[in-house]
Amino acid sequence: MKTLICDCNRTMPLAPGVTSRIAQALAKTPLASADGVESVHTLLCRREAGAFQRAAKSTSAAGEELLVACTQEQRLFLELNEQTEGAASVQERPIRFVNIRETGGWSRDARDAAPKIAALIAAAQLPPPDPVTTVTYRSGGRCLVIGGADAAMRAAGMLRDRLEVTLLVDRPGGALAQAHDLAVHHGRQPQLSGWLGAFEAQWIDDQPIDLDLCTRCNACIEACPEGAIGFDYRVDLAACKSHRDCVRVCDAAGAIDFARTPQTVEETFDLVLDLREQPAFSMHQLPQGYRHAGSDERALVDAVLALRELTGEFDKPRFFRYHDKLCAHSRNERVGCSACIEVCSARAIRSEASRKGKTSGQPLRRPVPVAGAASALPVAEGGGVVVEPFLCVGCGACSTVCPSGAMSFAYPGTAAQGLRLRTMLAAYAHAGGCDAALLLHSQGAGARLVDELGRAARTDRTIHGVPARVLPVPVWHTASVGLDLWLAAIAHGANQVWVLLTAEEAPEYRQALAEQMALAQAILSGLGYGGTHLALIEARDARDLVALDAALRAPPATGVRTPATFAVQAAKRDTLDLALEHLLAQAPQPRDEIALPAAGAPFGSLRVDPDKCTLCLSCVGACPERALADNPDKPQLRFVESHCVQCGLCAATCPERAITLQPRLWLADGGRARKTARVLAETVPYSCIRCGKPFGTLQAIEAMIGKLAGHPAFQGAAADRLKMCADCRVIDIHTKRDEVRITDL
């Protein structure tokens, strides 16, 4: 891959020999290409544009790819490529771009930015992640506008040339158009569900005037002595004195009937514009195709512009993968872990605990009808959890909080994300960089803030800019990267991992990320790594640039001596095991046991009260991760701590309430102890009083005898049968029957 670097008219004070250092670093970095790194250009987009054209031709002829270290003039370079004879089109051979200017070249320590530039280029050279399946929305342009008559009519005027508009007037006042050219309904208590192309609206129509029959002749308005009818064609029933003059003048049309029974009306729409003050949906991430404007004029214009373009077919990635066999949400209709349901800001995940093990893998009935290709896509379900891909917005927070890895982010997958982080850190280290801090930020508002900080450093001497040791990493959503990737990054040589939060993130995400970071920091501190390794950085807009600039200059923490070389796995628990193994091996002061915060802890042990436990083994059947097991040779409850995800299903299932969770990370014997089965509870077996064969535990049989002591069916000889094994119980019953028959004879 050929790489072109430009210092943007010498505004980036790059140190001499920067390209050779970058080339050497890339040569040592797997999957990176060092052969095509040219000397630094000064005006690649203007005076030296010929160098770009020559590179475009040569790479096309050689079948290579081209990377330009400039995003400012991306459009210009693409146009130049199309005008260059012999250069392949971007459809045949896409040109890649990477920003090194705002992300480091314009900082106060830009002369030390060679390792960072090497890291950014190495990441940009990686092959694109595997494509993911898509979710298809189909919209025919049927748009429902909800609000007062005046506001709804005004909005309809801005939409009707592109969309099929229906008005739902939910309040008195205002005036409807005289022309009968729009579908108009009166309704109260309107309710909505669904998404783009599949909204279901429901309302109650209890008005005497039927707007379909009404001719807008206005005779009823003129006839009403109380003035209870306005040009919105609603009857103010509180003001109406039942003269029914309006009914008489409307006799021919028959549009007014005070005896009409209130009707519940249901209709489906593709789009919704909501002009009420309170939106129909209360979640942070609103469904696609729904826009709420209220009385905000600017919001109305934005909503209208967006809705006008939403006709046709639209694809979005299916952001998640769900492995129901790993899910610890429910078992036997008992609920354990609900982390994904609680964190989802789009309410795309719901509990169906009663379905566990019954219909896993079968499509569920959707809450609203979906047409075309959309209806053929089944929801993800199993394990008692159902994920609706049409509501999912791709935040990835469910994968971050999932302790078992049942929910994973797919855009891109964890393995691809881990490869990018490891590649960046390796290139950074090979170029001589130290104390690398990863700054994870969104591709939207987060990237804009990083760019604004870089630009501010050019004109404001009080702003430092993005430091040379800080590696910005754009991700689809900041909540999609969690504990496994953070710890893996630290193991791969990152000194710190910071997450930049803007106004995009929902409150649920902030809390979830803070809890997960507290867990990661507890682990690192418990292993003896000094300093603060993880932090959330809040910067909502450009007004917070000074605070962001200061946060990025935080002191480094203690990292690993030797970076790990393992590859991040698709399975979350596998990655965590690899990261913990390396961090433990490099730990300055390791402990055998690290106490973890209870909130969101994915590791831990169980405490079993020996005075309560009857060894009924209900917990074994409830454990979805096979952390609990029995011993076929002895009455024992065994436990493998590395399998436990602290879901709490065992404690919820235990009939004696003998189990409590103990969040911790147990690292005795180099971490091997947590992977070995150990006995949590055992008891003396109870032997059959007839044949002497063990058939239960002492506590269980004694508890059963105590509970049935007063039952009339278990008195006398029948009580002794409770102390017999199943075979002897049957023999004893038949023996007693034979004795009775002989006595009768």
Image (cartoon, rainbow, N blue to C red):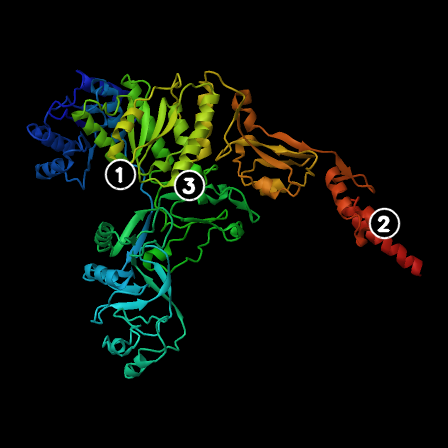
Q: Nearer the viewer, mark 2 or mark 3?
A: 3
Residue with the mark numbered 1: 444
Pick the quarter of the image with the N terminus: top left
Q: Which of 445 and 249 is in front in this view?
A: 249
Q: Is residue 213 positioned above or below 22 on the image? A: below
Neighbours of disc 3 within 10 Å: few (<14), some (14-19), many (20+): many
Could you say where residue 100 lies in the image, as x and y percent from the top left? 21, 27
Could you say where residue 88 lies in the image, as x and y percent from the top left? 14, 38
Do the residues bearing badges 1 and 2 touch, measured as CB atoms within 8 Å? Answer: no
- Closer to the chain start, of discs 3 and 1, is 3
In this view of the protein, can residue 1 be seen by the observer?
no
For badge 1, the amino acid type reads Gly
Pick the quarter of the image with the C terminus: bottom right
Residue with the mark numbered 3: 398
In this view of the protein, can residue 540 be seen by the observer?
yes
For badge 3, the amino acid type reads Cys
Could you say where residue 270 lies in the image, as x and y percent from the top left? 30, 59
Local SS, label 3? helix
| Cα–Cα gap, marks 2 and 3 | 58 Å
Could you say where residue 15 lies in the image, as x and y percent from the top left? 18, 16
Local SS, label 2? helix
Local SS, label 1? loop
Residue with the mark numbered 2: 717
